Amino acid sequence: MNQRKILVVDDEKHIRLLYQEELQAEGYAVATSDGVEDILETLAREAPDVVILDIKLGPNRSGLDLLQQIRSQEQNLPVILCTAYDSFQHDLKSIAADYYVVKAVDLTELKSKISAALKTA
């Protein structure tokens, strides 16, 4: 079976490492990005099956803007927005995401969203 690949885009290194460790333990291949590199270049190189995208990527970068860039090229790539703030759920830009998860140390919800995203992909 081909290993499914997840791209984690988050500006916080400890979050990237946590997600990478947990998701690799579930059998996924995991690529990470701090969100500074051009997202379309990252997608082209990594060819992920699912993208987990943080909304707040440092002071001047928004995951919602990256989401729009992703959607301009990849309409069918599942994107899970992941953030510490649930207020963004009502931001109109976030509609383009397939799923929305509020960050937690327990990744149960995130893993179930990944699983659901891969089923529909």
Image (tube, helix red, strand yellow):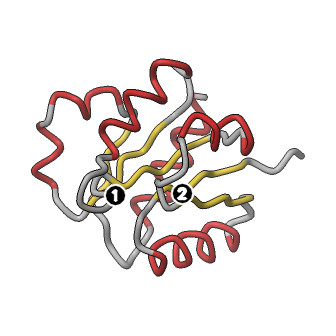
Q: Position of residue 89 (x, y in %)?
A: 17, 43
Q: Position of residue 94 (x, y in %)?
A: 25, 34
Q: Nearer the viewer, residue 30 or 65?
A: 65
Task: Name the residue carrying label 1.
Answer: 57
Amino acid of disc 2: Val
Residue found at x 11% / y 37% = 90
Q: Tell me the CA gap for discs 1 and 2.
A: 12 Å
Residue 8 numbered tag: 2
Quadrant of residue 65 within the rendered picture: top left
Q: Are marks 1 and 2 in contact (CB under 8 Å)?
A: no
Q: Secondary structure at mark 2?
A: strand
Residue found at x 34% / y 58% = 57
Q: Earlier in the sequence, mark 1 or mark 2?
A: 2
Mark 2 nearby-residue class (10 Å; few <14, some 14–19, many ≥20): many
Mark 1 nearby-residue class (10 Å; few <14, some 14–19, many ≥20): many
Residue found at x 46% / y 38% = 79
Amino acid of disc 1: Leu
Q: Position of residue 16 (x, y in %)?
A: 52, 70
